[in-house]
């Protein structure tokens, strides 16, 4: 029996079935359940909070319009996160096209410290200096993620940040698991090199 057949049942299936019958409350439940992870994926892909919010809105709109065509060949979450990845890719192409025409660097948006990055604060309330240092570190890490080629960035975000399995990533990106692993290896090596440079270690 394959790993695909061994997977646990899709706990979204009942909500999806209700959505297909036009139940807006069911779709709202799916939005509430998945929006956090979708926003995190989009933000890590494009490096800008406002763009990430728009990507998630666009992805949910696409999902709502296309839910009638969703089949149980994969989990609903896999299908949904694939839409987020594809929407993020499209947004990145638009950003790069605009950057070429406006002659600005994508790197400028990473190091602004404008508060667009959401950093989870510990319950013991770190000092302002510690918060600033953490935010600067997060910005440097995101800057290195942004410098990765798209194919490497996608697998790094999905595996190391979101914790998806190799099989799930393979399903989302429509590539072999071996390709996922080799891209992830390259992505991690590139991240190490970048972080050594930006952190001076």
Image (cartoon, rainbow, N blue to C red):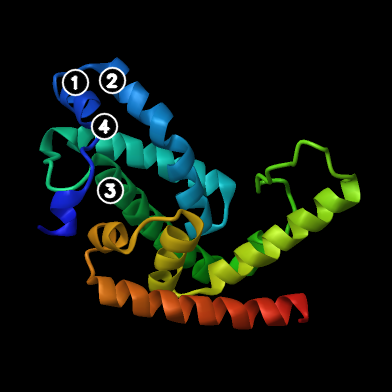
Determine contact: label 2, label 3, CB under 8 Å.
no
The residue lying at 43 percent from left, 44 percent from top is: 38
The spot of residue 141 in percent (x, y) is 64, 65
The residue lying at 30 percent from left, 42 percent from top is: 77
Q: Earlier in the sequence, mark 2 or mark 4?
A: 4
The residue wearing badge 1 is 18
The residue wearing badge 4 is 12
Secondary structure type for disc 4? loop
Q: Earlier in the sequence, mark 2 or mark 1?
A: 1
- In the picture, measured across the screen, residue 109 lies left or right of residue 162, that is right
Q: Which mark is residue 26?
A: 2
Q: Is residue 128 above or below residue 103?
A: above
The residue lying at 76 percent from left, 59 percent from top is: 136
Q: Can residue 111 be seen in the rendering of this structure?
A: no
Secondary structure type for disc 3? helix
The residue wearing badge 3 is 78
Secondary structure type for disc 2? helix
- In the picture, measured across the screen, residue 95 lies left or right of residue 1, that is right
Q: Earlier in the sequence, mark 2 or mark 3?
A: 2
Q: Which mark is residue 38?
A: none
Nearer the viewer's eye, disc 2 or disc 4?
4
């Amino acid at each position: 029996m394959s790993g695909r057949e061994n997977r646990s049942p899709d706990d979204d299936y009942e909500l999806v079935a209700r959505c297909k019958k036009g139940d807006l409350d069911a779709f709202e439940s799916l939005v509430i359940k998945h929006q956090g992870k979708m926003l995190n994926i989009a933000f890590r892909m494009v490096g800008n909070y406002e763009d990430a919010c728009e990507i998630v809105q666009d992805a949910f709109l696409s999902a709502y319009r296309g839910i009638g065509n969703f089949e149980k060949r994969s989990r609903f979450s896999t299908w949904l996160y694939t839409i987020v990845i594809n929407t993020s890719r499209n947004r990145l192409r638009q950003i790069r096209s605009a950057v070429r025409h406006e002659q600005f660097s994508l790197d400028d948006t990473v190091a602004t410290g404008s508060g667009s990055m959401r950093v989870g604060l510990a319950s013991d309330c770190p000092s302002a200096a510690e918060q600033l240092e953490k935010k600067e570190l997060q910005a440097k890490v995101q800057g290195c993620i942004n410098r990765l080629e798209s194919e490497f960035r996608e697998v790094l975000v999905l595996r190391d940040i979101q914790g998806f399995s190799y099989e799930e990533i393979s399903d989302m990106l429509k590539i072999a698991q071996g390709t996922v692993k080799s891209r992830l290896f390259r992505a991690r090596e590139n991240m190490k090199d970048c972080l050594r440079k930006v952190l001076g270690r």
